[in-house]
Amino acid sequence: MSRPLTATIDLAALRHNYLLAKRVHGGRAIAAVKANAYGHGAVQCATALADIADGFGVAAIEEAIELRDAGIKNPILLLEGWFEAGELALIQQYDFWTSLHSVEQIAEIERAAITKPLTVWMKIDSGMHRLGVQPEDFRAAYERLLTTGKVAKVVVMTHFARADELGCDATAKQVARFRAAIEGLDVETSMSNSGGVLGWPEGRGDWARPGIMLYGGVCADGDLPETPKPVMHLDSAVIAVRDLPAGEPIGYGARFVTETPTRMGVVACGYADGYPRIVPTGTPVLVNGQTSRILGRVSMDMLVVDLTGIAGADIGAKVRLWGEGLPANKIAQAAGTIDYEIFCNVKRAHFVYAK
Ligand SMILES: *Cc1c(COP(=O)(O)O)cnc(C)c1O
């Protein structure tokens, strides 16, 4: 018997969520499958979306080549652009689209041998202050880029810093700065990540760039009109059971001591699988579909759950770490992080792809 930890990836839910992004935003959508599709498996997710996706977004050329080599023919956008000018040759060879985020990179295009004109997504820094050309420099930079004669098409893009905060005016301000920078230009635009798609109608353009919503993650700090479906279900099983009296410690560091007679179960899942070690006692978990809690410290390969009062909870009981019925963001909150990071960290589990 193999270790029972399984990440089941619901590809029908993934497709549903992509179509939801397109329907809400309108226009076309780049599905962000960077970082191994947020831990879900980039090749499998891109393959499952290939017949409906307008394009895929990745962080680096290695991720893009992996998709091309797996037979993905859709446009692939390098969301972070290139890191050294030498990559421009590969970008042409593989027919990738690339972001461009600085004036220095225009100079690199000027110097590069380009035989096949590039599709460039030119990024404007509308207020996040991470990547992008400053709004006041944009016009001159855009003209200079066109003058190279090495560009077939330009899409102008920006990225929101606070689209997940529904009560905050930062996104509307970014939209206004972006629109002012491109006013009067006849170019395609792209602004919204998942939070923008679902929360900010004013952030719509020709292209959306949904990521976390494709995987059913949390896109905002409040209620949204549409809810994506969970895609990853991380499940394991109870591999050992103990009945302890009150006053007994559990696990490394004796971080939890039973207060009453307690039935506890050891589960095959630990921080080496991506379950966050930092979560406290009380973090939710489902045992045979019933809500329970983590007890004591998470160890490398195992964690302990409370089976007291859970019907039928014996060796072999089903344990859901997150998925349908228990959003990954609950575990993320207990760990002081976001579900994006929780998903990206999953490893060593068996991955099962369900159509
Ligand atoms: C990752 C990424 C996205 C997707 O963001 P989500 O918040 O996951 O929807 C969109 N645009 C860019 C430039 C990105 O790097």
Image: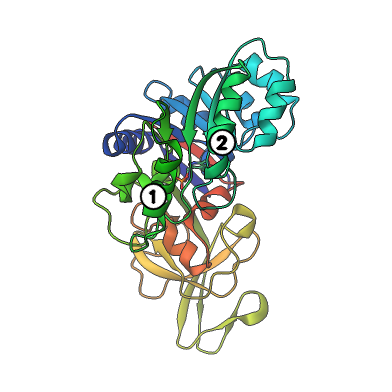
- Mark 1 element type: helix
188 lies left or right of 269: left
Of pointers 1 and 2, the one earlier in the residue sequence: 2
Mark 1 is surrounded, within 10 Å at the Cα level, by few (under 14), some (14 to 19) or many (20 or more) other residues, namely many
> Is ligand 1 within 8 Å of the beta carbon of the residue shown at mark 2?
yes
Q: Which mark is residue 177?
A: none
Assess whether mark 2 and mark 1 are in contact (beta carbons under 8 angstroms): no
Find out if the beta carbon at label 1 lies less than 8 Å from the nearest ligand 1 atom.
Answer: yes
What SS does tag 2 mark? Answer: loop
- Who's the residue at 33% across and 38% down the image? 21
Quadrant showing the C terminus: top left
Up/down of 21 relative to 49, above or below = below
**Could you tell me the amino acid type at mark 2?**
Leu
- Residue 79 is marked as 2
Name above or below for residue 219 compared with residue 107.
below
In the picture, residue 20 is in which quadrant?
top left
Say whether residue 320 is left or right of residue 295: left
Location of residue 138 in the rendering, given as x and y in whole percent from the top left corner: 54, 37
> Where is residue 141 drawn, in percent x and y?
59, 32
Q: Picture coordinates of residue 179 (x, y %)?
A: 40, 41
Residue depicted at 71% across the width and 18% down the height? 89
Does residue 249 lie above or below 339 as drawn? below
Quarter of the picture containing the N terminus is top right
**Amino acid at dot 1:** Gly
Is residue 320 in view? no
Q: Would you say 147 lies left or right of 215 here?
A: right
Provide the residue designation for mark 1: 195
Q: How is the image coloured?
A: rainbow
The extreme top residue here reads: 115
| Residue at x 52% of width, y 44% of height | 135
C-alpha span from label 1 to label 2: 17 Å
Return the residue nearer the eye: 171 or 242. Answer: 171
